[in-house]
């Protein structure tokens, strides 16, 4: 079976070599190492969603930072630079970790699903900025429009 395994791995590697727009997650991790969700972006992303008023008013933009980093880099939220920094300082990050876990759940519904879709779109645009060497700023108007129209983040970024 080993020769068959090597053959298939070789085919996958050959296929990956032909793809022009591969994501370099190491570059994304480097670029996002010190990035934090701007407070105004968190307010825009979490605002206007019924049943999330408390999260919008009292929520920490760190939630957006951890989830955007996680989605853009395909890393686990607990390994995000912000979470590592908080742990290093001895700060209790249990609440942040729990909120990130709730917003990454597989079967979200309602308000949390709406916020998660916004955060995923935001992270997609942030990742594209990393990939193209652009400033790490996302136009939240594009994110909100994308969430309302159901278009993809890629088409929103192309505008």
Image (tube, rainbow, N blue to C red):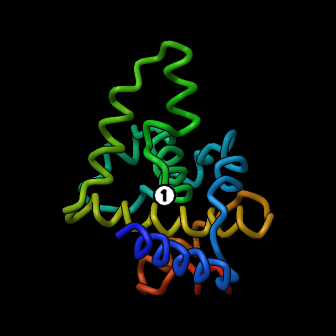
Crowding at label 1, few (<14), some or many (≥20) Cα neighbours within 10 Å? many
Q: Nearer the viewer, residue 44 or 124?
A: 124
**Above or below 122: residue 153:** below
Where is the C terminus found, in terms of image quarters? bottom right
User: Residue at position x 43%, y 45% from top?
Assistant: 76
Q: Nearer the viewer, residue 131 or 59?
A: 131
Q: Is 74 on the left-hand or right-hand side of 142?
A: left
What is the quadrant of residue 14 in the picture? bottom right
Instruction: State the image coordinates of residue 47 (x, y, percent, origin top left).
Output: 42, 58
Name the residue beneath numbered marker 1: 71
Where is the N terminus found, in terms of image quarters? bottom left
**Above or below 84: residue 92:** above
Instruction: State the image coordinates of residue 28 (x, y, percent, origin top left).
Output: 66, 55
User: Residue at position x 40%, y 19% from top?
Assistant: 92
Q: Is 112 on the left-hand or right-hand side of 31?
A: left
User: Residue at position x 44%, y 72% from top?
Assistant: 3
């Amino acid at each position: 079976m080993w020769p068959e395994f090597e053959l298939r791995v070789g085919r996958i590697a050959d296929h990956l070599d032909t793809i022009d727009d591969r994501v370099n997650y190491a570059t994304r991790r480097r670029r996002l190492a010190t990035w934090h969700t701007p407070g105004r972006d968190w307010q825009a992303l979490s605002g206007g969603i019924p049943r999330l008023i408390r999260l919008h008013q009292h929520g920490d933009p760190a939630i957006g930072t951890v989830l955007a980093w996680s989605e853009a880099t395909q890393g686990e939220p607990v390994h995000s630079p912000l979470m590592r920094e908080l742990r290093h300082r001895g700060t209790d990050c249990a609440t942040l970790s729990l909120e990130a876990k709730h917003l990454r759940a597989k079967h979200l519904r309602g308000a949390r699903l709406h916020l998660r879709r916004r955060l995923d779109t935001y992270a997609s645009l942030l990742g594209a900025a990393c990939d193209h060497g652009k400033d790490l700023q996302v136009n939240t108007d594009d994110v909100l429009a994308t969430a309302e129209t159901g278009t993809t983040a890629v088409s929103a970024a192309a505008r």
